[in-house]
């Protein structure tokens, strides 16, 4: 027996019949009837007298209704107290993200958090993974959105989505295929990549080792994604990036893209919470806002070539905390 069972039981009592309760709850009558029968089995006796006109409580049902009303009242009181405690939200919220993730999320997150916490001071921090992780550990960032490292180690995170990685070339670069290229052919393409301690370089090295080839480096660039794209436009080499990082340049004809296949490559975007002390309910609300924003971006195809992580698809219930 749980709070949901008691709520359904009370709904049948108030409706006066299983069929009316099913309509009010938006459930099948057979489902409501089955759950009532299971509840009767758990309490060891009939809860209702059934007739053609509806249902009436038995003595045992009257006893259970007292408890159902008490628990319902307790839950309502708890919910009001929790909502009152978190209505104003945190005094400030510092959110960090790597460049492409920041570009895709920061605007949406601003409006989502401003709608929920109008008085919260919001600060966005864009940067590279190593610096952002250091800031998170030092308590200078409250939460972080970043690409999960190839070797995550003891890092604790919530996976959100998976984003495809594409070969990015100058507009006049010619590959004898239409839209895709096997990963193994990267061995013959001069690449512009960051130095070895950066995430996308580690990913590229890992993929190359797994498929038995070495990367062909045109040059190393530890600058921004914008700088790397400019070097590609200037004909200095090619690179690998998510589609979201280059979509405007592709549409404008400044860059070309090829999907990597056999197999495809993707990176996981993850959420990390910092050390800022918070009430569990407030932490839950912040997590929900971020996850709902990500779900909206992916499902409405506003973040190209992405899919939600399976854990987020199966475990997320927008706006609904777990049952007591």
Image (cartoon, rainbow, N blue to C red):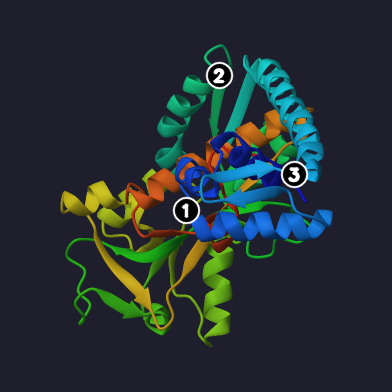
Instruction: Check the image and name the residue furthest to the bottom.
Output: 212
> Looking at the rendering, which quadrant does residue 284 occupy?
top right
Mark 1–mark 3 distance (CA, rounded to whole Å): 77 Å
As helix, strand or loop, the secondary structure at mark 3 comes to loop
Residue 237 appears in the figure: yes
Q: Which residue is mark 2?
A: 117
Q: Which residue is mark 1?
A: 221
291, 164: nearer the viewer = 291
14, 114: nearer the viewer = 14
Camera-nearest label, 3 or 2? 3
Camera-nearest label, 2 or 1? 2
Give the percent coordinates (x, y) of residue 64: 79, 40
- For disc 1, the neighbor class at 10 Å (few under 14, some 14 to 19, many from 20) is some
The reply to whether dot 2 and dot 1 touch (C-beta < 8 Å) is no
Q: Residue at x 37, y 78 (%)?
A: 261
107, 76: nearer the viewer = 76
Residue 224 appears in the figure: no
Q: Residue at x 49, y 49 (%)?
A: 19
The reply to whether dot 1 and dot 3 touch (C-beta < 8 Å) is no
> Looking at the rendering, which quadrant does residue 7 occupy?
top right
Q: Residue at x 74, y 52 (%)?
A: 156
Mark 3–mark 2 distance (CA, rounded to whole Å): 47 Å
3 or 2: tag closer to the N-terminus = 3
Q: Which residue is mark 3?
A: 58
């Amino acid at each position: 027996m749980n709070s949901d069972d008691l709520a359904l039981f009370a709904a049948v009592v108030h409706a006066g019949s299983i069929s009316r309760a099913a309509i009010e709850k938006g459930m099948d009558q057979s489902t409501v009837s089955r759950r009532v029968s299971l509840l009767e089995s758990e309490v060891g006796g009939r809860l209702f007298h059934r007739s053609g006109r509806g249902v009436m409580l038995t003595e045992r049902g009257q006893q259970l209704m007292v408890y159902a009303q008490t628990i319902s009242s307790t839950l309502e009181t708890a919910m009001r107290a929790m909502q009152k405690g978190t209505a104003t939200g945190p005094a400030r919220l510092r959110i960090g993200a790597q460049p492409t993730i920041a570009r895709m999320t920061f605007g949406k997150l601003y409006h989502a958090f401003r709608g929920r916490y109008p008085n919260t001071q919001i600060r966005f921090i864009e940067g590279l993974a190593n610096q952002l992780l250091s800031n998170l550990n030092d308590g200078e960032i409250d939460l972080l959105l970043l690409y999960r490292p190839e070797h995550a180690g003891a890092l604790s995170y919530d996976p959100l989505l998976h984003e495809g990685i594409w070969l990015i070339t100058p507009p006049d670069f010619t590959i004898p295929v239409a839209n895709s290229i096997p990963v193994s052919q990267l061995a013959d393409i001069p690449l512009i990549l960051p130095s070895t301690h950066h995430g996308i370089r580690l990913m590229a090295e890992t993929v190359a080792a797994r498929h038995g080839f070495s990367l062909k480096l045109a040059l190393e660039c530890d600058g921004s994604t914008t700088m790397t794209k400019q070097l590609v436009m200037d004909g200095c080499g090619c690179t690998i990036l998510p589609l979201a990082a280059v979509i405007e340049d592709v549409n404008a004809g400044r860059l070309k893209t090829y999907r990597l296949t056999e197999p495809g490559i993707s990176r996981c975007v993850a959420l990390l919470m910092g050390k800022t002390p918070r009430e569990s309910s407030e932490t839950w609300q912040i997590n929900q806002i971020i996850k709902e924003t990500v779900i909206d971006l992916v499902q409405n195809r506003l973040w190209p070539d992405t899919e939600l992580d399976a854990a987020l698809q199966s475990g997320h219930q927008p706006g609904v905390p777990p049952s007591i």
